[in-house]
Structure formats: structure tokens, C-alpha cells
């Protein structure tokens, strides 16, 4: 039997290729904006409609895309999305011939429609393709593909479209109207061959994706029932979803500003088009490097929420640095936003979709609609630049200095964006349960310590190396108590304490009736709770036995076959299942397995090679 990683390899590669495609198409906007501004003689605000045309499609088409996917499925939906993108690319050919801005924008919008269909399918698919705790890791891998393609697209189209743009701009002010039209028409024709090739590639991939081996996956349903009736009947009952949508909205706006304005910003600071065409690549390479770091760190060393908090704080810091620096240093801080942005998208998706169950598809469509932040916030930045520039020129400052100063000072718009992301990361990801968690945790901990002391004082197990492997203090039910009626009808869930005695046969417990020991308190737990009498040995070695109990899988399936081999915490375990059902979980003791335990709200794992008695453990607690 294959491990989860191996069985998901092919689908992950296929989805990564899709992220590569819409990364390439999306990030060429950085080169298109100054190109369109020149050939169509536009203002800054008008030129940023390139981004608007691309991203507004996510608002208009996300919910229809969700409906289409429900009707025809992921695979056919992805194929259709690629073909629609190909049609949009073909529209650039007549647009170049007519040199008409609205035709260009129509082609960009149609490509955006195709990308909406792809994104609506690909993002939730890769999020739920494996454990939710490692969702950010898989999306980070997608981000590497996406931004690597974006860097290539920016370089290729920057070379094709922006070469000679400075010479053309210099000539425009000194030639006749007829000569000017010839210059601009010639420049516009440079999009013909690149977009023809793009259209052909998209059509071919649209056909090939139909034959791709993509398995069907669905999000796990949540246990939100009272006496068989669901307490969750609407997406409006998930406040963290709407905060996640808002966070994603402002994030996409900030990301597009960092990637799509940096070339124009560089030109406004006095860099030539030949020099500035590489600036978007700086941003994207910063993102790729941070994505790679995220793949390594999440979730083994860093939780998704922690990564999101760090990203938001870094975004605020870099935004302030842009405002208070000049020249190439300021450019580098804009590019540095790629570091702050990289892990935001990968973290927001799993944190927002966590626990939504049957509402996952609708929630995914709402998150896709939030991409429209890229259609609204960058043009707003452009308008602020135009307004500031006009005001500075009116005050007597020359146009060159006014343009550079206005472009720099207008980056203040990024600060509230990252502040909203920080709010979501710190407070918005909570379950918003009206419950006094800290008091209940304190009460339960005291009860656990008292019970353990009784076991220590009345049994002969006190000489074992460690009586408690893990006390899974699966503390209490966290049902949503938004309605008083539901709260009154909800039955109280029992606290669950699981104590494992290491290196003892079951005959050491008198509840099994062998008479070797007298363990009255353990017997009381057996009488009032449950007594395992059909537990069969799957692997009696120290660490593998724990892995079997955690996962419910044989060792050759969960991958922990001996004390040396690594354990994959990304796979499901019973603590994760209990978390999804509303419990808080804790692990105290020794585990003999490397990596950061997943599925536990609190963990205090003791060194595996230390001899420690329960009395010492209780003293530590």
C-alpha cells in the first residue's frame, strides 16, 4: 500500500502545472501595464485597469464557476478554463491591429474568466488533497510553481514588450501625428506572436488535462449535529470564513501592487525600461525563496497561523521602509514584499476552510471572489499617485520629482492591508465560541492530577520508567453556542483521559482479573468508562505501538515500522478527529517520535531517553 505522499504525487504535479500556467499569465501584467500606458497614451490610473480587467472576473465568475464545477466536475472544469484562457489570448491579435484599449481589456478579462474556473477548482482541491494541517505546505509548493512561472513570464514579456520603450517615448514628443501612430502601431504589433503561441499552448493543455489521472476528493464533513439535526445551515454561521475572505481580498491587492507596480515605480524613479523590466522578477524570486522555506518549516516547525502573523508584521515593516527610503533601496523593499506575501495565500486557505465541511465549495468560491482585491486596490493606488502628482506639480515641483515622490508616498495604502491580515491571523482564525476555555482547562488539569496521584498511591506501577505515555486530555466540547436553544439541547460531552502504561502487560491491571496486582482506581475507570478486551498487538516495539494507536493503522501503512524510521505527522490521527468534533486536546508524556506533534492544542513531550516516574511528571505539571 502506498503512503499518502506517494499516492498524491501525480495529482500534486498536475495541479502544480496549472498553477504554473496561471502564474505565467497573471504576472505578465507587470510588463503589460507600462506597455499599454505607452501604446494607448494612458494615465497611471487608466493603465492599472489592466490589473482590474484580470481580477474583476473573479468577482463576476467565482460563484458561476463553482456551479459549473458541481455540474461537470474538476477535470472537465479545468479543461474548460484552459480553453477559455486560450480564447482570451487570441483576442490580443485583433486588439493589436486596432490598437484599441478596451479590446485588450476584453481579452484580459476573458483570460481572467478562464483563470477563475481553474483557481476555483485547483485551490480547494490541493487544500483538501491531504491533511488540513499541511495545507499551507502543499499550497506553498503550488506557489513555487506559480511564482517561478511569473518570473519567467515577466522576463520574457518584459524583453518582448519593453525593449526600446524609452526610445519610443522620447520620440513621441517630437514627431508628427502620423509618425507617432506608426511608432505606436509597430510597438503594438509586438504582442502578436507571443499571444498566438500562448493560445496554442493553452488549447493543447486544455485537451491533455482531460486525460490526467486526478482522483476525486471531498472535504471532511463537520460534526455539527444535535440529536441528528445539523446546527450549521448557512455559511453565515462561520465568522472566520468572512474574515478570511476579507484578509484574502486585501492580500491580493497588496501582492498585485508589489508585483505589478514595481516596474512603473522604477521608471518613475529614473530607471530605464531596460533596467526596470527585471524588478518584478526580484519580487517573484523573493516569494519563491520564501515558499521553499515554508515547504520545509510548515507544519513540522512552524504552524500556519504563526507564519501568517509573521508575514503580516513583515509586510507592515517593509511598507514603512518603502515610504522612508529612496531610489534602488526603496525598490528593494517593494521587492522584499514578496517575502512578506509568500506564505499569506498558503496560510489563509486552510485556516479559512478548516471545519467548513459541506460548505467548503461555496466558501472556496467566496475566497476566489476575494481575488478581486487585485482589481480594486492597485487602481486605487494609481489614483492616489495621480492625485498626489497633480497636487505636487500645482505647488511648483517639477514633473519628474513630483512623479517619483507621488509614487513613493502612495505606498501607504499597503499598511491597512497588512493590518487587516494581522487581525485575521491573531483573532480571526478563532472558532468564536462563547466558552470560558481557560477556566475549564484549569479545572480539568487539577482533576487529572488528583486522579493520577490516586493511581500512583494505590498501584504497584510506580517503579515503571513512565506510567503515563500520554494523557490525551481531550478536554471539553466546544459546540457553537450562538443560539440559546441549541446550547440548552446540546448534551454535555464527556472529558476523555487516555493513560498508557509503558512496557506493561494487561495482566498488571486487576480489572482484567488475573490477580497479579491490585489497581482499584484503574478498575474504577474501567467500570465507569471502557475496558479494552479485544486489543490485538500490531507492533509491540516502543514507538511503532504508539503510532498504531494514534493512527489506527498498521505500521507498514502509517510508516513507523521501528524506533528509527521517521513518523509522518501529516497523516490523520484520532486526536485530529476529536479536534474536528469540537474537543480540545493535549499530550503530556513521552512519545518516542520525532517532529512536532499534530492534532494537539497543547503538548509537553518529554525526552525519550530519560527515566522519569509519574511522581516527577505530576510535580512538573
Image (cartoon, rainbow, N blue to C red):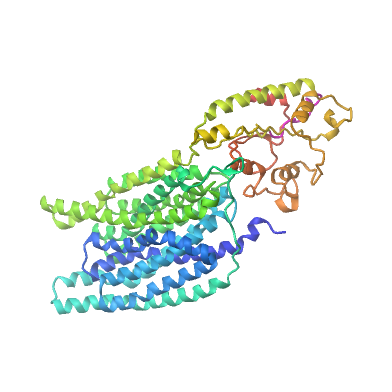
Predominant secondary structure, magenta span: loop
- Tell me residue 193's x, y (percent): 37, 78
Q: Position of residue 90 (x, y in %)?
A: 37, 76
Q: Is residue 438 above or below residue 22?
A: above
- 355 or 294: nearer the viewer: 355
- Relative vertical location of residue 54 with respect to residue 245 in this rendering, above or below: below
Residue 149 visible in this rendered orientation of the protein: no
Q: Position of residue 314 (x, y in %)?
A: 40, 44
Residue 465 among those drawn in magenta: yes
Magenta stretch: includes residue 330: no
From the viewer's side, name the closer residue of 609 and 459. 459
Q: Residue at x 60, y 33 (%)?
A: 476
On the rendered structure, is 410 left or right of 392?
right
Residue furthest to the right:
515
Image quadrant occupied by the N terminus: bottom right
State which region is magenta: 459-470
Which of 388/76 is in front? 76
Q: Within the image, what quadrant is residue 167 found in? A: bottom left
Amino acid at each position: 500500500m502506498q503512503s499518502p505522499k506517494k499516492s498524491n504525487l501525480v495529482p500534486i504535479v498536475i495541479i502544480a502545472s496549472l498553477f504554473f500556467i496561471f502564474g505565467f499569465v497573471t504576472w505578465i501584467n507587470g510588463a503589460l501595464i507600462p506597455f499599454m500606458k505607452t501604446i494607448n497614451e494612458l494615465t497611471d490610473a487608466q493603465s492599472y485597469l489592466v490589473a482590474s480587467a484580470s481580477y474583476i472576473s473573479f468577482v463576476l465568475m467565482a460563484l458561476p464557476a463553482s456551479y459549473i464545477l458541481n455540474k461537470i466536475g474538476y477535470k472537465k472544469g479545468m479543461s474548460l478554463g484552459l480553453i477559455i484562457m486560450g480564447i482570451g489570448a487570441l483576442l490580443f491579435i485583433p486588439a493589436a491591429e486596432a490598437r484599441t484599449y478596451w479590446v485588450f481589456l476584453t481579452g484580459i478579462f476573458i483570460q481572467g474568466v478562464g483563470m477563475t474556473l481553474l483557481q476555483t477548482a485547483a485551490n480547494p482541491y490541493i487544500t483538501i488533497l491531504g491533511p488540513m494541517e499541511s495545507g499551507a505546505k502543499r499550497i506553498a509548493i503550488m506557489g513555487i510553481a506559480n511564482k517561478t512561472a511569473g518570473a519567467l513570464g515577466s522576463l520574457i514579456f518584459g524583453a518582448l514588450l519593453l525593449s526600446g520603450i524609452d526610445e519610443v517615448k522620447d520620440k513621441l514628443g517630437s514627431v508628427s501625428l502620423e509618425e507617432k501612430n506608426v511608432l505606436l502601431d509597430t510597438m503594438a504589433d509586438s504582442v502578436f506572436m507571443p499571444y498566438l503561441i500562448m493560445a496554442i499552448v493553452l488549447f493543447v493543455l486544455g485537451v491533455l488535462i482531460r486525460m490526467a489521472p486526478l482522483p476525486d476528493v471531498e472535504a471532511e464533513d463537520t460534526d455539527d449535529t444535535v440529536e441528528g439535526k445539523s446546527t450549521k445551515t448557512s455559511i453565515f454561521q462561520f465568522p472566520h470564513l468572512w474574515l478570511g475572505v476579507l484578509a484574502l481580498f486585501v492580500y491580493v491587492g497588496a501582492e498585485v501592487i508589489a508585483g505589478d507596480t514595481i516596474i512603473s515605480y522604477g521608471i518613475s524613479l529614473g530607471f530605464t525600461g531596460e533596467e526596470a523590466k527585471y524588478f518584478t522578477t526580484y519580487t517573484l524570486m523573493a516569494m519563491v525563496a520564501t515558499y521553499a522555506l515554508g515547504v520545509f518549516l510548515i507544519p513540522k516547525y512552524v504552524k500556519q497561523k504563526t507564519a501568517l502573523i509573521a508575514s503580516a508584521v513583515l509586510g507592515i515593516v517593509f511598507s514603512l521602509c518603502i515610504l522612508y527610503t529612496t531610489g534602488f533601496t526603496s525598490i528593494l523593499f517593494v521587492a522584499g514584499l514578496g517575502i512578506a506575501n509568500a506564505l499569506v495565500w498558503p496560510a489563509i486557505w486552510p485556516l479559512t476552510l478548516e471545519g467548513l465541511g459541506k460548505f467548503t465549495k461555496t466558501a472556496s468560491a467566496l475566497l476566489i471572489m476575494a481575488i478581486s482585491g487585485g482589481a480594486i486596490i492597485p487602481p486605487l493606488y494609481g489614483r492616489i499617485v495621480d492625485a498626489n502628482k497633480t497636487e505636487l506639480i500645482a505647488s511648483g515641483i517639477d514633473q519628474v520629482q513630483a512623479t517619483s515622490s507621488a509614487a513613493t508616498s502612495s505606498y501607504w495604502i499597503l499598511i491597512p492591508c497588512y493590518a487587516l491580515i494581522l487581525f485575521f491571523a491573531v483573532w480571526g482564525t478563532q472558532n468564536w465560541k462563547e466558552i470560558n476555555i481557560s477556566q475549564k482547562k484549569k479545572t480539568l488539569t487539577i482533576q487529572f492530577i488528583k486522579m493520577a496521584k490516586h493511581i500512583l498511591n494505590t498501584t504497584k506501577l510506580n517503579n515503571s520508567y513512565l506510567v503515563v505515555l500520554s494523557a490525551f486530555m481531550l478536554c471539553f466540547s466546544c459546540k457553537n453556542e450562538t443560539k440559546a436553544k441549541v446550547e440548552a439541547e446540546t448534551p454535555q460531552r464527556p472529558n476523555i483521559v487516555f493513560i498508557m502504561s509503558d512496557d506493561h502487560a494487561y495482566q498488571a491491571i486487576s480489572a482484567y482479573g488475573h490477580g497479579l496486582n491490585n489497581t482499584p482506581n484503574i478498575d474504577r475507570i474501567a467500570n465507569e468508562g471502557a475496558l479494552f478486551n479485544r486489543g490485538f498487538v500490531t507492533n509491540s516495539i516502543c514507538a511503532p505501538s504508539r503510532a498504531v494507536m494514534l493512527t489506527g493503522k498498521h505500521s507498514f501503512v502509517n510508516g513507523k515500522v521501528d524506533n528509527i524510521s521517521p513518523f509522518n505527522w501529516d497523516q490523520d490521527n484520532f486526536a485530529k478527529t476529536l479536534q474536528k468534533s469540537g474537543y480540545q486536546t493535549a499530550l503530556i508524556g513521552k512519545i518516542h517520535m520525532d517532529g512536532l506533534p499534530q492534532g494537539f492544542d497543547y503538548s509537553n513531550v518529554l525526552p525519550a531517553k530519560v527515566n522519569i516516574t509519574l511522581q516527577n511528571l505530576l510535580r512538573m505539571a
